[in-house]
Image (tube, rainbow, N blue to C red):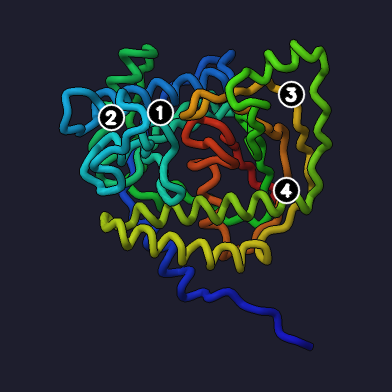
Amino acid sequence: MTPQPEPPRRVIAELTALWHELPVSMVRFPAPADWTWRQLLQAHNVLRTAAWNERCSAVSARPCRELPQMRCLQLNRGTCAADVLIPMSPGGGSESWRVATLRLIWRPAARDIQLIAIGATAVQEVGWAMRTLRKELDWQGTPDPGVCLLDDLRLPEARAWRITTVSPWVYDKQPSADGKVSLRLERERASVAPKPVPSPSKQQVGIELCQDLSLRARRLTSLCSADARWQLIGAELVRGLSNEWLPLAIAVDQCQLSAPNLELVERGSNGGEFGLMAFEGYLDITVAAWALPWLSLLPIFGLGTNPDKGYGAVELQPLR
């Protein structure tokens, strides 16, 4: 019998130890019973806008976000709090290996909203984030003294899990015909209902899930060093490791996802609008023990595209 390939366990152990040593801070807020994922998106936008208005280290009198089509001089250098907290090129998105270090997590089952700060800079800015959320949204939070490291947020040992979407899992973007006209307006002009999207197969969802976990691991690794070259190189090496081994460690056992027409529209840096194509529902998976640190990233970093805006939020429930 041909022996089954084994992942490089020593490398995985050293890598996950590096992740688990990252400093973390958590603040808990009570969530109203009637709260929705659209309010989660709004809360993310409040925090992102405040960060780039109040924590920008621009050398000019105006924050970088007010200078469209211009790149921040301190981008990716770790010297600007706004860039570290919520990476964003003015007029565009962040580098593919960067990730927001201030994150809002909604847990409907527990009626709980969590503000999680990852890394030294974000942990130092938790007080500012709490004041911002109190001022803008009237949120009153309580710090959780039991959360100091990323290790405190890892999932318990279990081989089977249910992943339930809390906000839409965005898997693709669809530009309008001319890049400028609203998709909604185009439909009204054509008087044609959008074509229904078939539910994804277990195989399709498995591919998307492993790709997302690989990307989350890549971005988390970039937080383990302040050196931009190390961030880029380390992130790329982790992506290669994840892409090779995660598909062998995770199996989708059941998939109950649909792709409803949610009329989600985002505006790009050129003024054009994009329709967001998304899944909602749940899936059951089986995971190898060594891959649990990857799975532990999902409740923190979400699934799909635009997770730093609140999309792709999930809850995980152990099944066995």
Residue annotated with mark 2:
64
Type of amino acid at the residue the image marks with label 1: Arg
Q: Where is 15 relative to 80, above or below?
A: below
Residue at 79% in and 15% down? 190
Is residue 306 shown left or right of residue 224? Answer: right
Which element is circle 3 on?
Answer: loop
Comparing marks 1 and 3, which lies closer to the viewer?
A: 3
Asked whether, in this view, residue 305 is left or right of residue 192, the answer is left
The residue identified by callout 4 is: 205
Relative height, residue 11 to residue 189 (above, below)? below
Q: Position of residue 260 (x, y in %)?
A: 75, 26
**Closer to the camera in the image, 233 or 103:** 233
Task: Tell me the residue that label 3 is attached to.
Answer: 261
Residue 21 appears at what percent x and percent y?
A: 34, 56
The residue mark sitting in front, 2 or 3, is: 2
- Closer to the N terminus: mark 2 or mark 4? 2
Is 106 situated left or right of 248 in this image?
left
Q: Secondary structure at mark 2?
A: helix
In the rendered image, which quarter is residue 114 located in? top left
> Looking at the picture, how far across and down is residue 152, in whole percent?
41, 48
- Residue linked to disc 1: 28
